[in-house]
Image: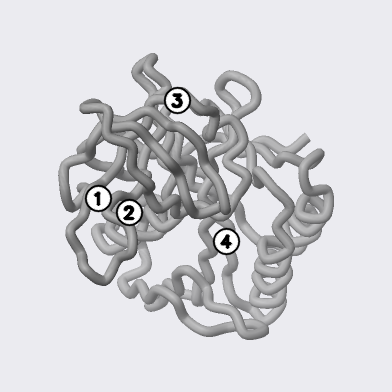
Amino acid sequence: MRFQTPLLPAVLLRRYKRFLADARLEDGTEITAHCANPGSMMGLKEPGMRIWLEPNDDPRKKLNYGWRLVDHENGHFTGVDTSVPNRALRAALMAHQIPELADYPMVRPEVKYGQNSRIDFLLTGNGPDLYLEVKSVTLSRQAGVAEFPDSVTARGAKHLAELQQMKAEGHRAMMLYLVQRTDAEHVTLAEDIDPTYAAAFDAAHAAGVEVLAYDCKISPEEITINQSLPFLRR
């Protein structure tokens, strides 16, 4: 998934009110950008960090910039826009680029299911329907280890319960953790941050909900699905 307009480097000044960030452009101009990430962004919001912004001239948008990347300045990047994984994954699914999911000819996004929920993707056309929920992973507190979640997520636990119900009804159900970092070697759960989510995951997995993890190739030009990562649990 290529960015619609070339990204601009900047220095983060502060992130506040969840969806706002102040930054300084290279010419010294200070601007406010939209931050499409409702999580805690632990380790990704410290003032002084080098970031990348996507400018826009869309009159329907209140802000002229969107915060897209954190540049760790060591050759690695983290994508902070939580809408990106579904867009990048949809392109990969449609092109049958995910080997574990390549046998499904039909891919439908945002299908209603469960209790007033929408599944990220419903894959059909070859065997049992596959209900696929996607989570964006950006937290890393230890080198090489990506963790989910970065804050308490009652919504995430609800999704796991609904996937478990789909499995009980005879469908396939899968949780896909998409790591928006280029420095991760494996994925795990941040059980200390949200033990309720970890318990919901264990129950769903024991009931047959499948687990898959992938990382991304990230640059100021594009974000694409890269390769599978080990998911480790205890």
| Three-letter residue code for mark 2 | Ala
| Residue for badge 2 | 88
- Which of 113/128 is in front? 113
Q: Residue furthest front?
A: 29
| Residue for badge 1 | 1
Image mark for residue 49:
3
| Three-letter residue code for mark 3 | Met
Label 2: which secondary element: helix
Q: Point out the image quarter for the C terminus.
A: top right
| Three-letter residue code for mark 4 | Met
Label 3 and label 2: CA atoms lie apart by 25 Å
Q: Where is residue 7 drawn, in percent x and y?
A: 22, 39
Label 3: which secondary element: loop
Label 4 and label 1: CA atoms lie apart by 23 Å
Q: Where is residue 210 drawn, in percent x and y?
A: 61, 57
Label 2 and label 4: CA atoms lie apart by 18 Å
Q: Residue furthest top?
A: 74
Image mark for residue 174:
4
Residue located at (65% from left, 43% from top): 150
Q: Looking at the image, is mark 4 or mark 1 earlier in the sequence?
A: 1
Closer to viewer: mark 3 or mark 4: 3
Above-or-below relation of 216 to 4: above
